Image (spheres, rainbow, N blue to C red):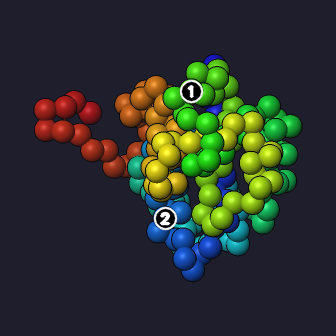
């Protein structure tokens, strides 16, 4: 069964987080997530950027905005999703990845601003990618790569107008 991974970006602030959130969207799309939901106010610059990438580079990646995180968590849980929160204060990914791989539907939560305690409580997995400061972009990339066992790195994106290949690689 195909994995369905959705990313929830907690607490996006357009005036401060545009570049980082854009990179979260790029990583989510490139490494196998079907959709990203941005919790926070609508950001038209972000929408334009992500839709342009999807149009040119292919795939069916979706972008949504939501005013709150809790209703999204409840909605996805009702649809059979496991909730995975990426945090420095969680259990190590290497100890939990086997359990997470058995889940075909995952809502992965990545923060922007400080995450409230309710996110920890509502999550099925609170996962750390190491115990050192790092970015949510890196954490998301590692989670997705581990969930898909690296297979998404070879994915072909349908409808792509742009495709990069090495000189000696066939398209």
Q: Quadrant of residue 104?
A: top right
Farthest residue in the left direction? 168
The secondary structure type at the circle numbered 2 is helix
Mark 1 touching mark 2, by CB under 8 A?
Answer: no
Q: Quadrant of the N terminus?
A: top right
| Residue 2: % across, % down | 61, 24
Q: Residue at x 52, y 38 (%)?
A: 143
Q: Residue at x 62, y 58 (%)?
A: 111
| Residue 73: % across, % down | 79, 47
Reply above or below: 27 against 43: above
Q: Residues within 10 Å of mark 1 (few under 14, many from 20)?
A: few
Task: Please give left or right for residue 45 compared with residue 58 in the image.
Answer: right
The secondary structure type at the circle numbered 1 is helix
Q: Quadrant of residue 107?
A: top right
Q: Residue at x 51, y 37 (%)?
A: 144
Q: CA distance from mark 1 to mark 2?
A: 28 Å
| Residue 115: % across, % down | 69, 60
Q: Residue at x 66, y 45 (%)?
A: 85
Task: Please give left or right for residue 24 compared with residue 13 in the image.
Answer: left
Q: Nearer the viewer, residue 16 or 121?
A: 121
Count of marks placed on residues: 2
Q: Is residue 6 visible from the viewing direction of this image?
A: no
Farthest residue in the bottom direction? 15
Q: Is residue 47 visible from the viewing direction of this image?
A: yes
Q: Which residue is mark 1?
A: 95
Q: Nearer the viewer, residue 96 or 147?
A: 96
Q: Quadrant of the C terminus?
A: top left
| Residue 164: % across, % down | 27, 44
The disc at residue 20 is 2
Reply above or below: 65 against 126: below
């Amino acid at each position: 069964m195909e994995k369905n991974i959705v990313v929830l970006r907690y607490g996006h602030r357009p005036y401060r987080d545009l570049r980082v959130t854009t990179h979260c969207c790029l990583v989510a799309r490139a490494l196998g997530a079907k959709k990203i939901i941005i919790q926070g106010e609508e950001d038209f610059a972000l929408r334009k950027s992500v839709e342009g990438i999807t149009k040119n580079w292919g795939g069916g990646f979706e972008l949504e905005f939501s005013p709150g995180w809790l209703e999204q968590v409840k909605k996805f849980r009702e649809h059979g999703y496991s909730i995975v929160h990426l945090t420095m204060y969680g259990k190590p990914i290497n100890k939990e990845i086997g359990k997470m791989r058995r889940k075909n539907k995952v809502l992965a939560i990545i923060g922007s601003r400080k995450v409230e305690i309710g996110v920890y409580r509502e999550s099925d997995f609170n996962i750390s990618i190491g115990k050192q400061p790092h970015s949510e972009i890196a954490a998301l990339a590692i989670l997705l790569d581990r969930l898909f066992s690296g297979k998404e790195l070879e994915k072909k994106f349908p409808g792509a107008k742009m495709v990069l290949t090495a000189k000696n690689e066939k398209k």
